[in-house]
Amino acid sequence: MTGWWVLAAALVATFLVAFAARAVNGRFRSTGSDGVPATEDAEGRFDLGALGRRPGETATLVQFSSAFCQPCRATRAVLAQVAELVPGVEVVEVDAEAHLELVREWGVLRTPTVFVLDSSGRLVRRASGAPSRDQVLAAVAEAIE
């Protein structure tokens, strides 16, 4: 009889963890003191020059991805759609495995991770997991303001 209670408790715990993980997956969060890396410059900007890129005219979407990440492929497509819909938005994809120093500096814990930068390269929002197109559009609108 005790085994059934243990099994039931394990199932409930698994359900709660899965529900919590799904609730935060792909959600954009604002950057606060916990989201500001120690390596950003004095003006709080993501250094796209280190990647050989420049910020977009209105916003830049930076995606950290890895080769075998299935959600990264879907996120790549979503970001491309947003770049087509909103003029002046650039998409920069960063291979997390090839840029481990950036992964550490910016606190990227999983792929995909998406940063939304304003026109000057300042980090406005970030999301871990695959965001929806509407979530990305809302974050870009905030960056443009």
Image (cartoon, rainbow, N blue to C red):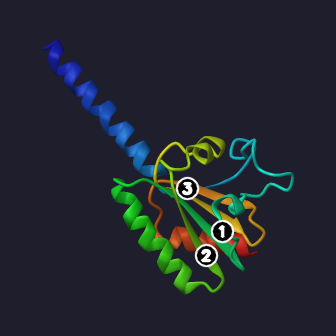
- The answer for how far apart the CA atoms under marks 3 and 1 are is 21 Å
Name the residue that disc number 1 marks.
Answer: 53
Q: Residues within 10 Å of mark 3 (few under 14, many from 20)?
A: many
The image position of residue 51, as x and y in percent, is 63, 61
The image position of residue 132, as x and y in percent, is 46, 67
Nearer to the camera, 52 or 12: 52
Question: Mark 1 or mark 2, which is nearer the start of the sequence?
Answer: 1
Q: Secondary structure at mark 1?
A: loop
- The answer for how far apart the CA atoms under marks 3 and 2 are is 17 Å
The image position of residue 17, as x and y in percent, is 38, 37
Name the residue that disc number 3 marks.
Answer: 127
Amino acid carrying mark 2 in the image: Glu
Tell me the quarter of the picture where residue 130 sits. Answer: bottom left
Name the residue that disc number 2 marks.
Answer: 90
Amino acid carrying mark 3 in the image: Ala
Q: Secondary structure at mark 3?
A: strand
- The answer for how far apart the CA atoms under marks 2 and 1 are is 10 Å
Q: Residue at x 45, y 72 (%)?
A: 78
Compared with 88, 50 (above or below) is above
Contact check, label 3 and label 2, Cβ < 8 Å: no
